């Protein structure tokens, strides 16, 4: 059974550009959540999608957006990149969004560097 | 808002000794507390978890204890080995319906096992 796949693994972008990251969940999983990981802040929740609908959202500016497709694959987009957006972006998939009832699995992440 | 405090941020332990990492949460509705291990360059992986109706859980060299009254829970690793070197994250999860949770992570503890 394939795990959670994130592409690309590494990205270098310049300030002001935009970027799209992709997450393919485990087959059958309908919930995909996104996290930003930085050394100082740890894992910070961005948003969660379930059945193509954004169900929950963290405290990030509107430059961060996402979507989910009918096959549960999810993308997140960051527009007008800032240096502070440099981070490891992780997605996690689960059957539902209830991690207590169904284990969540992380992808390996996309490391974004903004220069 | 709700948060999870994790301490220490860095921990160095002699191989063979024990390591303890502590987390304190604020949301009294939290009822599930997983711990994740993230080795360098790899994805976070669930290593142990505990539910609010249990005070302690053990899996070989790893144990987790929960004090609901004090709202804190701890990860205990005994007989540490070099492969235990990693970043460890705690999380506090509060249910939001049957298929949705609120998940807050601690900022992580970097554990170094010294030879």
Image (cartoon, coloured by chain):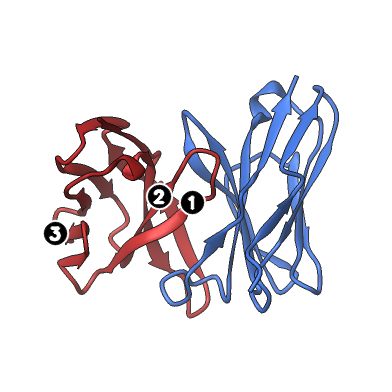
Can you identify the residue that label 3 sits on? B69
- Chain under numbered label 3: B
**Chain that is blue in the image:** A
Can you identify the residue that label 1 sits on? B44
Q: Using the image, determine if residue B100 lies above or below residue A91.
A: below
Callout 1: 10 Å neighbours few (<14), some, many (20+)? many
Q: Please state the horizontal and vertical placement of residue B105, each as a whole percent of the image.
A: 42, 49
Can you name the residue that lies furthest to the top here? Answer: A115
Callout 3: 10 Å neighbours few (<14), some, many (20+)? few
**Chain that is red in the image:** B
Disc 3 to disc 2: CB gap under 8 Å: no
* Quarter of the view holding residue B91: bottom left
Disc 1 to disc 2: CB gap under 8 Å: yes
- Chain under numbered label 1: B
Can you identify the residue that label 2 sits on? B37
Q: Which of marks 1 and 2 is nearer the N terminus?
A: 2
Give the structural element (helix, strand or loop) at label 3: loop
């Amino acid at each position: 059974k394939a795990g959670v796949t994130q592409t690309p693994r590494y990205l270098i972008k310049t300030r002001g550009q935009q970027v799209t990251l992709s997450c393919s969940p485990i087959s059958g999983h309908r919930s995909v959540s996104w996290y930003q990981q930085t050394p100082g802040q740890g894992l910070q929740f961005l948003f969660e999608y379930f059945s193509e609908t954004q169900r929950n959202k963290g405290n990030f500016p509107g430059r961060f957006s996402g979507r989910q497709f009918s096959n549960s694959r999810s993308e997140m987009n960051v527009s007008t990149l800032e240096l502070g957006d440099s981070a490891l972006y992780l997605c996690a998939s689960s059957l539902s969004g209830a991690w207590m009832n169904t284990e969540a699995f992380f992808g390996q992440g996309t490391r974004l560097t903004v220069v | 808002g709700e948060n999870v405090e994790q301490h220490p941020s860095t921990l160095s332990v002699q191989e063979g000794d024990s390591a303890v990492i502590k987390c304190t949460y604020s949301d009294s509705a939290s009822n599930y507390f997983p711990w994740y291990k993230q080795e360098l360059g790899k994805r976070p992986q669930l290593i142990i978890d505990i539910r609010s109706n249990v005070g302690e859980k053990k899996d070989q060299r790893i144990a987790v204890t929960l004090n609901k009254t004090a709202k804190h829970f701890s990860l205990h690793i005994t007989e540490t080995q070099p492969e235990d070197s990693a970043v460890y994250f705690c999380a506090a999860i509060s249910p939001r319906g049957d298929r949705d949770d609120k998940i807050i992570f601690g900022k992580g503890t970097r554990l170094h096992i010294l030879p």
